[in-house]
Image (tube, rainbow, N blue to C red):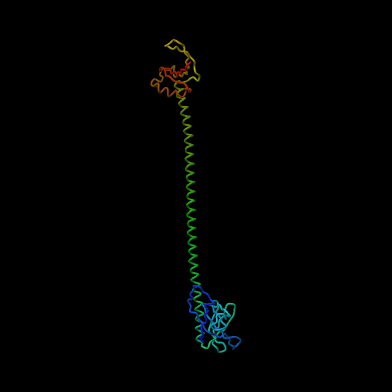
Amino acid sequence: MSSGASVDCSDLIRFGSVVMRLANKKGTLHELKRGSELERGYYCLFGNLLYVFENEADANSVKGLIFLESGSSKVTTLNATPVLNISTVGGRTINLTTKDAVDLYEWQNAIEGGKIVNISRKIEDTETSLVALQHKVEKLEESHQDSERLYVEMKSSLQQAKDSQLTLQKQLETSEKQNTELSSLLKSSESERLLLLRSRGILPKRQPIWSLYTDESNDVLKCMKIWCGTWNLSGKDTFAHMQKERAKLVLRAFIPPGYDMYILGKLCVYMVYVCGV
């Protein structure tokens, strides 16, 4: 292949900060067209892109761009002439030839090398995307685990609240039952106490008795309001051992409010309430 002058494509292609890892292949190739007629073209290989220039060393004379990434290239013979056969995207097939077949293999290696570099770059991009995707998946898994943990905690809290409610309900039922039992016991105790008092002859009168008494200091008659209660007036053995304070406690339930109580004698108990006149 005739080396010729290198084509400067810096004004044609701007890669920014991208550094091409493949040494660019530049040179002159002949494109075979219409049988044995040769059409000279100047080619510059950038990675997997093959630029075709009409004039040598003239970046403004570009007349074609061939994508080689999805195409295939092979060195073969056409009319006993070694050619580099390139099948491009879209079904186009071109045959390139040089004076030296060795140059064809160099171009083929450069083209395939560009494909490898591009595939490697895609693999790296894919790996980067895969890592980013895996990171997102891990974040989603962590979020899912947090949601599950929160759900379990809320479920546990709800169950604890239900258990606490059941416990309080049982305590309430127990308290109501105890209250009922205490009320029943209180009624029974009151009934038993009344029965006991009645069995002992304690039958308090339900209405006050008015009476008069003489004040010894001035011999003036005064009004007394008396509430009487007796026990075993006819019995022989009364509450012989009951003290007056004990009798007061026993008989207190029969005393209307606003009266004072006095215990007189052993055989008879009078609840006497003095009212001023």
Outermost residue on the right side: it is 34
Residue placed furthest toward the left:
241
Q: Quadrant location of residue 66?
A: bottom right
Can you say whether 63 is above or below 269 in the image?
A: below
Q: Is residue 206 above or below residue 74?
A: above
- The correct choice, above or below, for 194 with respect to 1 in the image is above
- The residue sitting at the bottom extreme is 80
Res 213 quadrant in image: top left
When asked about the image quadrant of residue 61, the answer is: bottom right
Identify which residue, 122 or 156, lies in the foreground: 122
Task: Answer with left or right where residue 61 lies relative to residue 204.
Answer: right
Name the spot of residue 248 as percent of width and height, x first: 42, 22
Nearest the viewer among 127 and 21 is 21
Q: How many marks?
A: 0
Residue 40 image offset from top left, x and y in percent:
57, 86
Q: Position of residue 134 (x, y in %)?
A: 48, 64
Q: Residue 53 at x, y = what percent?
A: 56, 82
